[in-house]
Structure formats: structure tokens, C-alpha cells
Image (tube, helix red, strand yellow):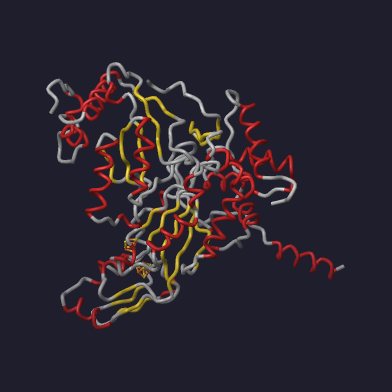
Amino acid sequence: MADDLKIPLLEELEKGPWPSFVSDIKSMADKSEVAADLLRQLEKSYEDKRGYWKHGGLVGVLGYGGGVIGRYSALPEEFPGVSHFHTVRVNQPSGWVYTSKALNEIMDIWDEHGSGLTNMHGSTGDMVLLGTNTDELEPTFQALTQKGWDLGGSGSDMRTPSCCIGPARCEWACYDTMDLCYNLTQEYQDELHRPMFNYKFKIKMSGCPNDCVASQARSDMAIIGIWKDEIQIDKDAYAAYMKDGFNIKDLVVDMCPTGCITADENDIEIDDSNCVKCMHCIARLPKALAPGKERGATISLGAKAPIVEGALIAQNIIPFMEMEKPYEELHDLIERIWEFWDDHGKARERIGEFIERVSLATFLENTGLDPLPQMVQEPRDNPYIFYEEYYAEEDEEAASDE
Amino acid sequence: MAADVSIDQLADDMYEIVADSAGKKKLKAGDLTKAMTAKYGDAITRKDCKAAIKQLIDSGRCVYGYFGGSSIELPRTEGAANE
Ligand code: SF4
Ligand code: SF4
């Protein structure tokens, strides 16, 4: 560790059972003045109870409006190592699957052009390369692209799409999340690199309702694998669980949120018409139960963290869509949503806030979607949808009464 | 693309708006598209506007900025930049 590194407040964060970013950065402080000054500046922030970063809003690479987050130190004389401390977001591979060779390439590039510090991964999903100066941005970009990497999104663009590992490892995947993630990344390169929206738009894909990428809470568009038909039951595997003394009543029957399972030591039956596809029974009895065979995805819109307005959880807009190549129906939906949001959204208004402001009814009408019962988020929640057909019928009735 | 309004023309018009707004108002891509639609109506499409913005950025005449939301601006050395 650098001899003159006095960071007693930060060292408090190393105590306790959890891994500490302070320990990680300290381990690099001997060979990197950037790492040492990063800790020193942060210690000063803790002492003075204020931040010392300035936003660099214009830094980037030629042609791209996203992928680089500019930061300058407000105290460059005191902490020259972090005078510039820009972050580079690198588009991660679908499902975060790398070879060690690929990771080594990235690390070599970052040791040469940046601080060597990384954050694997940022909340959007990208690999985050922390800390470089303005002059190194273009060379970093060139080195990355020569090895087949690209920058991810930032600012008011489509953020780097991310997905769970899906069918590569998981038998519950109801569609090929990795293929769709790659498809959307390629299809919307302009939207990813050239910010053109009112604000950010995140798309996350999970292969089943376990939602391992937390898309329902953390993306503007959550695409979650689902099935339409019955849960598949392997009776022999079920019998094996029972033979092993599995407590079916306490662990499954009583835990089903809609009480749609009837089971004892001899048999299990599921009333699929009342199943809300929470995955609980399947997760408990993975050898005996599996998602149905008619598979696709359900699409929800509007989750976000509390920045401009409060946090929102996503709202369902498409209960079921087949998710097969070339994904034309999905592309068409995404583009209709973008167009309406783009034309009528306010600056820094996420899609969830936009729908709340213009009303769900207006949003559906302008994106060509039909109102459906699945859009009612809570019991007694009135979405104020009025069917034109209903009024047409009323008018007809009134006319025939006359 | 309508024959009478070229991408170059759109890019020039957009550049003028960005230059006029410099230091006063941050313009988003959507603001430029709306301004062009107001000026040329159906003679242009959203795609044309995208192509014009691409040309402005790729040629280096304009750059993207980010201050809460993304904007399109003239290249300059920003106040926050350290030597
Ligand atoms: S979301 Fe479902 S399919 Fe994807 S990894 Fe998790 S459990 Fe498997
Ligand atoms: S998936 Fe959930 S709701 Fe459906 S049967 Fe199993 S436990 Fe019940």
C-alpha cells in the first residue's frame, strides 16, 4: 500500500463480514497513483461530508453519444491522479458469459489505457471500466473495437439490453433470452449509441418468472418468459419426492398464492386456470414440475428507481407474445412505444412516468394496444378504460329505442 | 426522402438551430426533429432527421452532451474540464 495513504474513515468500511471496495482499491494503490488518489479524495469527502466530483458532460468518443461518463476532480492539484476520472461502459455479452481470454484482453486494454479498476458489472449490466483521462478515450475505444467489443449505452438512449443466462444453462427458460438480447442490441445500434429519446430506456429479459435480472423492478421494458398451457407434471418424479418424505402440504400446497394445487402423497393436480405462474411449486419440485410447452414471454412497462419521480414497478401490457426469430412483432411494438413517447414525453420522463401522466387509456390508444384485464395492477384499481364498442352499442340501442 | 429537402439541407438547418441556442438552451434530438417537421411537414421523415443528426455528429460539427438528459451541442471545452 502507498506509504502516505491515510484513510481511517474509509478503513472503517473494511470492518465486518462483507467484501469491501476499499480493500480492493487499496490492493492497487501501490502500483497505481489513480487508485491511491481515488481513495484520498474519497476520504476527504467523508471528512468534509461533501463530494468532490465534477460532471464532464461533453466527453465521449466520436460518433457516440453514450458509453462514456465524464468525471473530473474538483481538487485536481491535491489529487492529480484523479484529475480526470472518466468511466467507460463496455457492452457485456448476453448473459455475462465470457472466456477468460476475453476478460484478459479487456484487462490488458484497461491497464494500458486506464486505471485498471473495474466494476463487474454496473447496474445496467455493462462492464464498467473506471477512471481514465480524456486523451485516452479514443485509444481505449479503438483497442476495444479491434478486439470485437463495443461501448454500451448511457444518457437518453436505449441502455445496453441485458438478459439472464436462459436456455444456455437453465431448463426453466421459456424463450431464448440470449438470442433476443443479441438481436435487440444489433437491431437498435442507433438507439443504443445515439441518444434520441426523452430519457433512458432499459430493456431486460428474463427467461421465466423467477426474473433473475429483476426486470420487473428495474427496466422500462421487462420481457419475461411465460407459458400458456399446463404446468408439466412428471408423476414418477413426484412419487420419488414423496418416497423421500417431501412435505408437500407445508412446502407447496399451502404456499401456492392462489391455492390452486391439490396434492397428497399419491398424486398432485394443478388447476392451471388459476395458476399465476409464480414458479414456487416448480422451484420446489424441479424434477417433477416444469413450465408448460406453449412458451413465449409476457411484457411489462415502466419500472424505475426513484430519481425524478418515485420508484415504479412495471405494469403488464402484453400477457403473452411468442418470442421467436425474427422477433418482428416485438420490434414493431417497441418502435410504436418509442414513437409515441418520443413525440409526447417530457425531458427526463421515463416511460412509466409518461404512462402515468398521459393515462393508460391514452397510451394504449396511441400505441394500438387493446385494454386487457391483466393491465389492472391491483384489486379495485380502476384503469379508466372505456370501450368504444360499448358506446357504439349504447348508441345503437338508443337509436333503436327512438 | 422527398427530392426537394436533402439530408445536407436538414443538417445545415439543424446546425443553425443548435448554434443559435448555444449557451441558452440545451436541445435534444427530438427538439431538432420537431423543428424540422414544423418547417418541412410531410416532405421529410423521422428517418431523414436521424440521418441528418448522424451526419452532424459524425462530421464533428456537433457533439452529444449530457447534463441530466442528452443534448446536441456545438463542440467546445466545457467549464468543468481540468487541464
Ligand atoms: S430467470 Fe428463469 S430462466 Fe432465467 S436464469 Fe433465472 S430461473 Fe433460469
Ligand atoms: S406456479 Fe405458483 S401459482 Fe402456479 S401452481 Fe405453482 S405455486 Fe401455484
Q: Residue at x 34, y 39 (%)?
A: A140
Residue A93 is drawn in which quadrant? Answer: bottom left
Q: Position of residue A87 (x, y in %)?
A: 35, 36
In the displayed structure, B52 sits above or below A214; it is: above
Q: Identify which residue, A74 or A46, lies in the foreground.
A: A74
In the visual, does B20 lie left or right of A132? right
Q: Identify which residue, A91 or A245, lies in the foreground.
A: A91
Q: Position of residue A266 (x, y in %)?
A: 25, 82
Report if residue A360 is visible in the image: yes
Q: Position of residue A153 (x, y in %)?
A: 43, 44
Q: Residue at x 26, y 67 (%)?
A: A284
Q: Identify which residue, A215 or A273, lies in the foreground.
A: A215
Task: Give the quadrant of ligand 1.
Answer: bottom left
Callout count: 0
Q: Position of residue A2 (x, y in %)?
A: 14, 25
Q: Residue at x 64, y 26 (%)?
A: B20
Report if residue A378 is visible in the image: no
Q: Among all residues in the image, which is located at the extreme top? A: A77
Question: Can you say which quadrant of the picture contains the C terminus of chain A?
Answer: bottom right
